[in-house]
Amino acid sequence: MNKLIKIIFLLFFIFNFIFLETVRANEKIKIGLLVPMTGANKEIGESIIKAVGLAVKEIDSSLIEIYPKDTATKANQTLKSAFELSEMGVKVVIGPVFYESLTYLDEMKNLTFLSLTNKTLDLPRNIISAGINSTSQFNTIKKFLDKNKIKKTIFLTPIQDYEFEVKKGIKESKIRIFQSYEYNIEPTKLTKQIEEITNYRVRKKNLENEIKRIKNSKDPNKERKIKNLEKRYSLGGLNFDAVVISDFKESLKSVTTSLLYTDVLPKNKYFITLNQWFDESLLNETDIQPLYYPSINKENFDNYKIKYFNAFNEDPTHLSLLSYDLVGLVYYLSLNSKVENLNKIFKKKNSFKGKIGIFDIKNNKINHRLNFYKIEDQKLIEIF
């Protein structure tokens, strides 16, 4: 009798286990999506929604359910939408897009947010920054400097709202700093600061003195020497080998123009900057080439853009690629654990390969393994 009871109990246990596993295998993966669907950033939100739909279609699983909600790029609206997602049983959310929308989300402790921001300072524990953060970029720059044995690098950082993010990235990457400077982006102040940083006035005076010395000399070749010197702007070596400019678009061009004005040339000193998302306008800036920067995998990005354009007859935003990858990440992690446990998974070391490339997850943070590129002779060239 006891043997029969044991057999019945064992069969019940096995049946119950199989039943629970079947239920779990068919459990819906509910993913919230917090994006601007109204307001000035509406087009960015629409692009992200389309990219997420594209990812779901490619994964081809009936288990994934997407629930888009509007943030209007406002913190209070974001909180309201997050609460609505929580009421619907959502545990993981892709978004918000912008750092300003994160303000109140620490109140939603039952939700995990995969924000598209690249800022990592002072984030609540339930928010994971999925953007291309400064640490990822400086890790890649450090790799380039080490490979080329570049030891004297100066760092130029604008006094902007991301200044401390840059400093954090420099510190966490353990990159070697020769000198570090902060600059004002206002053009006249910027030029003056670059002159001071590059010791331009002293080098210019050196040139004037050398021309004067040769003129007063009895050197038979002085006319030729003077003619060559007059082609220059300064005389005297610079005490650095590379300059890292943490800037973008027109502001980046202003800094490089100021460097050229002070006779710092990219053919003599490495000009390195942060991720430019393959800004094509830089291809035409031949005076500042070669120009180096870290970024995502260009080939993967191009393939994604073709796929997106074929589906929607328009070009995607780079943020939409991030969201495309995050859908795959959530699905991949959900196959091995319940969605509500993802916050714990993000504390453990893990890696995932997406369209951007490989990214590493640890301590509620995503770091991307980036490629490194240079623009030279109006061409984009992959270094590694």
Image (spheres, rainbow, N blue to C red):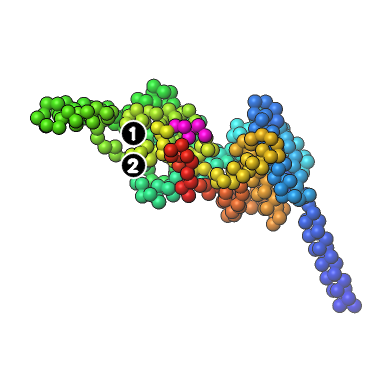
Q: Earlier in the sequence, mark 2 or mark 1?
A: 2
Q: Is residue 200 left or right of residue 171?
A: left
Magenta includes 180?
Answer: no
Residue at 34% in and 28% down: 261
Q: Residue furthest left?
A: 218
Q: Residues within 10 Å of mark 1 (few under 14, many from 20)?
A: many
Residue at 64% in and 39% down: 320
Q: Hey, what amino acid is under mark 1? A: Val
Q: Which residue is mark 1?
A: 264
Asked whether 170 or 123 is in front, the reply is 170
Magenta includes 284?
Answer: yes
Q: Residues within 10 Å of mark 2 (few under 14, many from 20)?
A: some
Asked whether 216 or 111 is in front, the reply is 216
What element does badge 1 sit on?
loop
- Disc number for residue 241: 2
In the picture, which quadrant includes the N terminus?
bottom right
What element does badge 2 sit on?
loop
